[in-house]
Image (tube, helix red, strand yellow):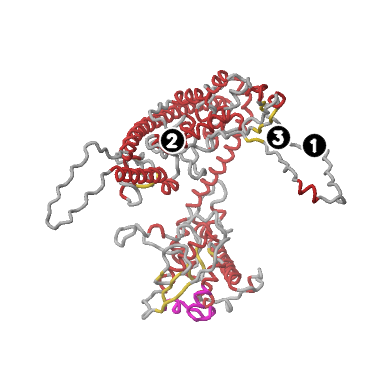
Amino acid sequence: MSNKASTSKTKVEDPSSDVEILSGSESESDSGSDNVAAESTKGKGKQGASHKSCCTSSLEGLTQPYTSLAVAPPRVDKKKVKRPASDEDDTEESEDEEPATKKPKSTKKTTGRTSVTVGGLSAFYDMPLEIIAEICSHLNGTDIVRLSLSSRPIRALLLSPSSKTIWIIARRASGLPDLTSDNMNEIEYAQLAFLTNCQGCDNAKVPQADYFLRKRLCKTCRKAEWVKNPHYSAHYHRETRLCVALTPATAANFHAYGTNYRYASKADAEFVSKRLFELEAEDKAIDLENAPPPQAPSPFFNVFVPKVAPDPNLVKSSLLADYIEARKVLVAKMTVDGQAMHSAVVNLEATARVAKSEEKSKSEALGHQRRRAIETKVRALGWDHRDFTGTWKTSIYVNKAELLDDTIWENIKAPVLKLLEKSKATRLVAEAATRATYRQDRLRAPYYMLRCSDSSILVFNDFVHLPSVRPFWEAVGSVFDEAQWNAALPAVLIDIESQRASTRVNAIKLILAATTNQRLSNDPAAYPEATFSDAFFAAPTSFLFCTLPGCRHKPKRRMYYYGSGGSAPRNIFFGPFTALIDHQRQVHPYADISSLSNGHFELPQFMADTIDTLAESIGVDSQRLTTADLDSAWYVWSNSPSKSTKYWNWPELIDEIYHKLSNLRGNMELPVVQIQARKKAPPALSQAL
């Protein structure tokens, strides 16, 4: 090669640096730093060649190198190579053919990726390795691993063989022990110890790694990639268990460490088992080749032929035995390293928990001291200690872990006083509501007398909000007077009747809205009792659900036994309007209905459609459906979201459908119910409502 060629520049696209590399005499000074990737590639070739030998191949199969951290070799720019024209092509070329026109070059600037050596972190890449090591010595292992994944140049720098000291210093500073086995480098060790991503799916966060198998896997990946007792399976070689690393953890419960080492990596077990079968076959082939020829039998009958003694100098092949012994030594070292790493990590986690607890206690003590100092100052301004509630104990201004001085107090005084004003307003509203509740409780005795004499009386919370009852408790300082109550009793009865009529109209409108498409009027005269009588409410299509809290006792059914003294299980009420009013009066007389709308009942559209589906399944028109028709069959909910699909009576079915589909109002399908006829209807089943 000429001198001119030796001094030419060859642009090599290095994925880690994107810097032009000189070849020939001009790049002799930089040859040592630019061949890191080539040395790593050469090392990989040696590692692949070690598979051919039985002993050195034991270093592989237990832990695979992480390709995400491997240093990729430099990629050379692809250049177009012109194919030399042959003589035949020259002769066949036509003279009349027009020459090809070149495409004009675009003058538009291309916005490409700039070189990493221009600005930014260029000074960091030019630093000596000793300074970079000193900088990284102040970082923990997690920060260094994440730094190596931040950019390709930093990654190539930290993964170079000359940066091994950085990883060793970070690992020892974290308290992790040195390894006795040589099948894991410092980079893999750091990734196993400091990263939390699953190495199988890279999605789940795994707080703890298995240092015996040297993998960090989630529960799903452990069940897929671990194998239990590989020597018991005919798929694996009988000596596989002795040649692979085992862990005392289980695939299902990772934290259940025991004394039995049973689980191994499936990939390692398959690799080692395959190698064992190969070596066993090689041993048999070598022994068969070196064995003496078989002795020919005698041609004569009953003639004794003495046996030839085996050759004492003949040695059987021991490739399999040597491989097993080498693997045993490696597995023993890995087990010792795993125990050491696991103990170190457990101690580190315990130390971190203690330090975190101490820091939290110290922070809480400082916050408590600051809060007491602020409370002393605001009390001097005339505030009451009862205002130190609500967000007072969680505000950053009051509970910050920092001592209070005059400068800080002047800065936070305005927001602290604003917080106190809000807390005081909330306290006054709560105290007023509590005092109003005390005054309402004085009306429980007259309400009980009315409830015993009138079956249409409303629940207590509706009763106390009647216009004629409000003067007895609404005013602050009001006192219940029996004479005044007797004088106001006729007006109270009129308000009760008016409230009952209004509730009845609301129930009719709710039923018609769920079962018909007609336009509803707000005039109560449009719903006369002659048209909407008790017969209208007695139809199953007009039944209503009670929405008062505590109506359904389903969660208590599993713990309830008849005669145990507990409250009996109860479905949510579903029945006629008159029975609903009586149910609320008897079961929920003092229910808290402050957050509920007037009426305290509902009929969802999906439940009205369910009743129509039941009528269609039975073969009866929904307008003529009766409870006796529903009692004549038992039901199978085909598309039930739970395993329970069979119901022996329709109240149970209605209760389950209402409960399970109430939380799916925006995304649900109509229940598909199949019926099976009863031979004999149970007595008084309809009275189970």
Q: Is residue 264 visible?
A: no
Tell how many labels.
3
- Residue 538: x, y in percent? 50, 75
- Residue 491: x, y in percent? 56, 63
Residue stretch rendered in magenta on the structure: 611-632
User: Viewer-proximal residue, 408 or 449?
Assistant: 408
* Number of the label disc, if any, that sits on residue 50: 2
Q: Residues within 10 Å of mark 2 (few under 14, many from 20)?
A: some
What residue is shown at x 76% (from left), y 49% (from top)? 88
Judged by depth in the image, the label closer to the viewer, 2 or 3, is: 2
Of the numbered discs 2 and 3, the one sitting upstream in the chain is 2
Q: Amino acid at mark 2?
A: Ser
User: Viewer-proximal residue, 376 or 183?
Assistant: 183
Q: Amino acid at mark 1?
A: Lys
Q: Where 60 falls versus 124 (above or below)? A: below
Magenta includes 320?
no
Q: Residues within 10 Å of mark 3 (few under 14, many from 20)?
A: few
Q: Is residue 12 visible?
A: yes
Image quadrant occupied by the C terminus: bottom left
Magenta includes 625?
yes
Of the numbered discs 1 and 2, the one sitting upstream in the chain is 2
